[in-house]
């Protein structure tokens, strides 16, 4: 196996993947947050569904290709990188990144909570302020249409947030962060899926043992009926990886 270097970047299905540990990720994001002058950076936590979904969404592909940091969110990406590039890629999941930043920086961190259903971000913000001591820069639900994007982006800009948590679903959250990055000028913007729901207590974090093994997706899909429709995407991803490995091997 290839020994990863701190700045190594791979390519999976035309998408970037940085070979970084969770600690390296937190170090890099901390540097971006407090660097002067302020500059916007987007973060993507790549998972198999992103790759499958992006096949039909060019804007989603572009948002990932130009992201400043792309980490391996789950074991599926680790497996794919091993199969297609013979590289061991560490995991840096979205929740662990968000929690790590809050634990490290506490009251020095201004966070904007953007996403989930109306009322959920408020609870998430209250809990994060209580548990980690972070400052709440702003709050807005994720149920708004494209014509409102500029208004919301300007709210984020005017809040002076250091960290933007965008939880509006795969594709939508990444393209929003990328399209409006210069307007928002937030040092770190991360598409974080269900993290706001977890912080609010509306969704359970997978048990520690499943997260250590990198198989929390099995626990989630198996126990949550709403996630059962994700299984075909995961199966499609496995087929894609196997077909790509066969294609490359045939050259």
Image: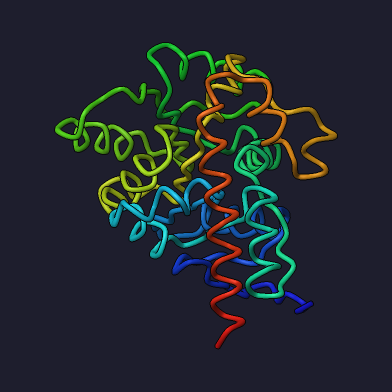
Which image quadrant: the C terminus? Answer: bottom right
On screen, residue 164 above or below 246: above
- Across and down, in percent, residue 37 comes to 41, 60
Q: How is the image coloured?
A: rainbow
Could you tell whether 159 is left or right of 77 in the image?
left
Q: Is residue 3 left or right of residue 223?
A: right
Percent position (x, y) of residue 149? Answer: 22, 35
- Identify the residue at image location x=60%, y=54%: 238
- Is 124 or 170 nearer to us in this picture? 170
- Residue displayed at 51% across by 43% down: 233
At a point 44% along the width and 51% down the height, the residue shown is 187
Q: Quadrant of residue 219?
A: top right
Q: Quadrant of the N terminus?
A: bottom right
| Residue 113 rendering spot, x and y as whole percentages | 45, 28
Quarter where residue 106 is shown = top right
| Residue that sits furthest to the left in the current view | 147
Residue 27 in picture, x, y percent from top left = 66, 57
């Amino acid at each position: 196996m290839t020994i990863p270097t701190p700045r190594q970047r791979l390519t999976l299905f035309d998408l970037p993947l940085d070979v970084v540990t969770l600690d390296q990720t937190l170090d890099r994001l901390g540097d971006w947050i407090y660097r002067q002058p302020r500059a916007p950076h987007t973060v993507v936590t790549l998972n198999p569904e992103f790759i499958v979904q992006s096949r039909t969404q060019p804007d989603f592909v572009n948002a990932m290709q130009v992201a400043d940091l792309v980490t391996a969110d789950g074991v599926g990406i680790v497996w794919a990188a091993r199969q297609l590039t013979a590289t061991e890629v560490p995991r840096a999941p979205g929740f662990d990144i968000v929690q790590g930043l809050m634990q490290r920086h506490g009251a020095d961190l201004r966070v904007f909570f953007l996403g989930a259903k109306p009322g959920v971000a408020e609870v998430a913000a209250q809990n994060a302020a209580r548990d980690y001591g972070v400052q709440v820069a702003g709050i807005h639900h994720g149920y708004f249409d494209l014509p409102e994007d500029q208004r919301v982006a300007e709210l984020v800009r005017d809040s002076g947030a250091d960290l933007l948590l965008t939880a509006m679903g795969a594709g939508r959250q990444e393209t929003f962060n990328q399209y409006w990055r210069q307007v928002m000028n937030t040092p770190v913007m991360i598409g974080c899926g269900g993290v706001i729901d977890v912080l609010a207590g509306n969704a359970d974090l997978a048990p520690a043992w499943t997260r250590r093994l990198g198989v929390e997706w099995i626990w989630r899909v198996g126990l949550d009926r709403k996630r059962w429709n994700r299984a075909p995407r995961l199966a499609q991803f496995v087929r894609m990886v196997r077909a790509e490995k066969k294609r490359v091997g045939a050259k």
